[in-house]
Image (cartoon, helix red, strand yellow):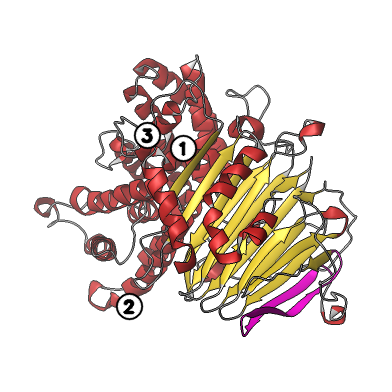
Amino acid sequence: MDNDDEMYILLLLADSNLPTGSFVASAGLESYVAHGFLSQNSSSSIIDFVQDSLPSYAHLALPFVSDAHRIISTYANAKNSPENNQDEVDRAVKKLIGLDELYEVMTLNHVARRASKAQGIALLTLYSKGFSRPLSISSNIDEPIRLHEARLTQLLDQYKVLIRSEETPGHLPVCWGMLTGALGLTLERSQYLHLFLHARSLLSASVRLNNIGPYGSQQILLHAVRPLVATEAAKCRMLRTGELDEDKDGFNRTTHGPANTWPLGDILAARHDQQHSRIFNS
Amino acid sequence: MTTPETSDSLNSETKIKSIAAGGGRITLAVHGTKAVFEDLSAAYPLKLLSPRINEPRVGVVYLLSYGGGLVAGDQVELDVVLKERSCLLVLSQGSTKVFKTRSGQRLASIRPNGTGASDDSLTTQTIRYTINSKSTLLLLPDPVTCFRSASYNQIQTFNVTPDGSFVILDWLTSGRKALDEDWAFTRYYSENEIFIGGRRWARDVMLLEGDNEDGEHLEGVVPSRRFLAEKLAPYSCYAMVLLYGREVEKIIDNLRVTFEMITVFKRREPEDLIWSFSPACNASPIGLGTGAIVRIAGTETDVVKVWLKERLRGLEEIVGPDVYRKAWR
């Protein structure tokens, strides 16, 4: 994929109208506000929240994004025809389920689990319904490209079926890694965009909660969030789950594995449903 | 917590030859109705003490380190086995104090296998628990207190049969109040991984990194870096409790019901104590018992302690009120 193609995919994925289910998630922000953590200067409190929440999410989720992306890339690069592809699919699925189950048991907060699953399946649905090539324009496509797309669709669709039948949880970071890997986005871009979107959805939630205005939100996104996303993307770039075979030897979980880094955020997020009134699902 | 009586403790030096520095083994079995430590051995700087208990099936052990704390480079590695129908209460002697990192100096130099400790100045405590059929582990230590510049790894692994039970408390404080330490340590890593019936049931990993690393944030970059103390304010004590199994089902139910009754109205300021209750993952296969995770944050350690003592009081039915009291002394 050349740079222009990748840029186009980035523009598509960064669209705030993309049906990913993030519209109903505040990732603990609504609860944070309700519990009295907002100061007089709500704009600076929102920045504080992003500064505390984003690193914790990055440290926990990026290893899963990275490994899922790597699984998809390995799968995509193997040159099989769809007819004898099932073994490859099964192998990839097995590894993806391993990641998904680890994310499930590491996300011990039921509200975060719920939100993550809702957004995960939405991404795979987006892939099959929104990013697949329409039949009307698929007739004149090159055979190798058609085969490549068919193989990826086979894997992602099969995984979606497993999520629907509750054989795997289908968490957001795993599905994001799958989606971006299938679309051919580089790992680095995938990681960066995932953190950017997380931060942006926090900002958009705070606008809807009326803590800041729409202009203020853009201001924060441009000037405050940008260095934060860059810092966390750089810091967590090399983190891995340790679940993939190629990582098993000598993997040091205490320095390179996923972790929660903000226990306060976890408690507040898990108290989301206890709020007397609320507009978000998490 | 006062120093536990030592009269009934087994001689922890007897098996010292086969144990590496900082290593230890505990095996609790039930003979008739009496709990018997079949093994209770440890090597410097780890020390184990077991006071006499008259409660049927129940054994109590204190994990101690010489001088009441761990210094830079100390590596504790302990194996704990609960045989069928036994109940083990694991306590500590006061908070586990972790002293500051001094590179190049260490007391116990044996590095545990598999933890991948890359730094000699890191203090590491690795404990593996095996909870056999119908046995109950109650792990209720005092909180860990990391001093200024300390760097600490705690890795606990639990292998549990589906009909076992446990209450695992893991908590830490912000430092020594008297010295104005407020989240001033360098690094704290705590991992609790639980397998039930051979299947991974939970892996809780908490990593808190202090503020004295450099080079991560450039000067003058907006927004300025958040200090650990700011992120965790106004709380100075964080606790996590994992609960599972038939023996503690009533306690879990009580916690769940109490949590569900909470209604949060919009506040101007944070409360002195907040807590959350989450049921264990739905991915757990059928046939497993009830499980839950509870997290608590409090402005003072005592607020959290009082809360814990009250909410876990149902454990008195298992260990008796006298033994239960020992946990909160």
Q: Nearer the viewer, residue B80 or B250?
A: B250
Is any atom of residue A238 visible in this view? no
Q: Is residue B58 left or right of residue A130?
A: right
CB atoms of marks 2 and 3 within 8 Å: no
Range of the magenta residues? B21-45
Residue at which label 3 appears: B263
Question: Marks 3/1: CA distance?
Answer: 13 Å
Residue carrying label 1: A268
Q: Magenta stretch containing residue B36, yes or no?
A: yes
Badge 1: chain ID: A
Among the two numbered marks 1 and 2 on one chain, the one whose residue lies closer to the N terminus: 2
Q: Residues within 10 Å of mark 2 (few under 14, many from 20)?
A: few
For mark 2, what is the residue?
A87
The residue under the point 46% across, 53% down is A108
Query: Is residue B26 visible in the rendered structure shown here?
Result: yes
Which amino acid, by three-letter code, is at mark 2? Asp
Q: Disc 2 vs disc 3: which is toward the camera?
A: 3
Label 1 sits on a secondary structure element that is helix
User: Are discs 3 and 1 less than 8 Å apart at CB?
Assistant: no
The residue lying furthest to the left in this view is A136
Task: Name the amino acid type tagged 3.
Answer: Thr
- What is the CA distance from the residue labelled 1 to the residue labelled 2? 44 Å
Q: Quadrant of residue A166?
A: bottom left
Determine which of the numbered discs, if any, sits on residue B226 in the image: none
Type of amino acid under label 1:
Leu
Q: Position of residue A136 (x, y in %)?
A: 9, 51
